[in-house]
Image (tube, grey):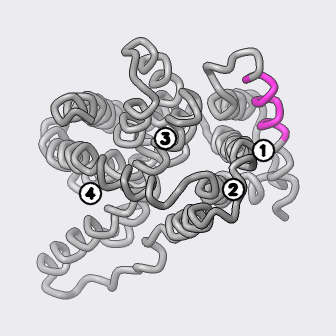
Amino acid sequence: MLLPGILLAAAVAVVAVLCARFAPLVGAPVFAIVLGVLIRAIVPLPAACKPGVAFSARSVLQAAIVVSGFGLSLAVVARTGLGTLPVTLGTIAVALVLAPLLGRLLRIGGALRILVGVGTAICGASAIAAVSSVIEPEEAEIALAIATVFFYNVVAVLVFPPIGHALQLSQDAFGLWAGTAINDTSSVVAAGYAYGRDAGDHATIVKLTRATLILPIVAAIALRRAHQKRGEGKPVPWRRIVPWFILWFLVAALVNSTGVIPGAWHDGIAMVAIFLISVALAAIGLQTELARLLRAGARPLALGFLLWIAVALSSLAIQRVTGL
């Protein structure tokens, strides 16, 4: 039954919204994930709540992104996605090139360094799951990669907004930085909206553009593996890999572009989207076991840290060079 877990995540989100009124620079999504992690560290998650919490972490987040699309125009989405491609492609290249090199130096196995590299380059756990369907790593390697990447997602939600303010980044500049330098969609959205509504919108578009690139990357890995195995590999489950919610986000932006949604509704739509994001982030926090993350191992954590720093710095550098 989903209801108990959804209600628990929603209750944490309500508290986060109230906390955000006293610290608007922090924002409800950041409070939500922190509160969720703290609650999970103090008390175990009841079994009755687990299905609903898992649903909130995944499906409510996707719903929030689709809802945010009703406040954007398709022209803005296209212009932002295409205009920021140099930074997106540059940061992806940095992660994918450095992952095998640093992984070898740290004596990390081939499958694990691929998973951490792709998770850092594209979209965290979603990318790791997609690539896992192709390279078939051990379950322990998948868990290690997800734990490593997610650890730095949580850190990024907390440290990116204050760093952005210290660097005096504009809303668009921060949105581009968050969208290209933070791994998982949930953390990108949380950090973006913590910085500001425009930064959140910008970060979401950049991130969704980045997420679509998992398709050619998985295809390339599948072709390489098929060549290595001389056609013995399993078929790629494309239906599970394609991020279908991005299509619905574009449909929502298209609907808004027709003018059928009054401009006066946009503030309300943004508030609903932020609350749904807070529910999703609360659920993610409630699922997070800090002790397990810290037990992920020093070498995978070191690889994740080096890749995370390299991507964050390269994103800012490419923005500066390209004038974005």
Give yes or no for contact between labels 4 and 2 (Cβ–Cβ under 8 Å).
no
Whether residue 99 is visible, yes or no, is no
Mark-to-mark CA distance, 1 and 2: 10 Å
Instruction: Give the distance between the C-alpha atoms of the residues marked 4 and 1, in whole angstroms.
Output: 34 Å
**In what quadrant of the picture does the C terminus appear?**
top left
Q: Which residue is mark 3?
A: 188
> Which structural element holds mark 4?
helix
Give the left or right position of residue 322, taking residue 126 as reference: left
User: What is the crowding at mark 2: few (fewer than 14 residues within 10 Å), some, or many (at least 20)?
Assistant: many
Mark 1 touches mark 3? (CB < 8 Å): no
Residue at x 18%, y 36% (from the top left corner): 322
Q: Which residues are magenta?
A: 11-20
The vertical placement of 256 against 174, above or below, is below
Q: Which residue is mark 2?
A: 60
Marker disc for residue 132: none
Quadrant of the rendered image containing residue 91: top left
Residue 129 percent location from the top left of the image: 43, 62
Horizontally, is 47 left or right of 147 in the view? right
Query: Residue tagged by mark 4?
Result: 111
**Kind of residue at badge 4:** Ala
- Label 3 vs 4, first from the N-terminus: 4
Query: Spatial distance from mark 2 to mark 3, Cα to Cα?
Result: 15 Å
Closer to the camera in the image, 103 or 82: 82
- The three-letter code of the residue at mark 2 reads Val
Which label lies toward us, 4 or 2?
2
Query: Which-is-in-front pick, marks 3 and 4?
Result: 3
- The rendered magenta stretch, by its main secondary structure, is classed as helix
Q: Residue 163 versus residue 258: which sits nearer the camera?
A: 258
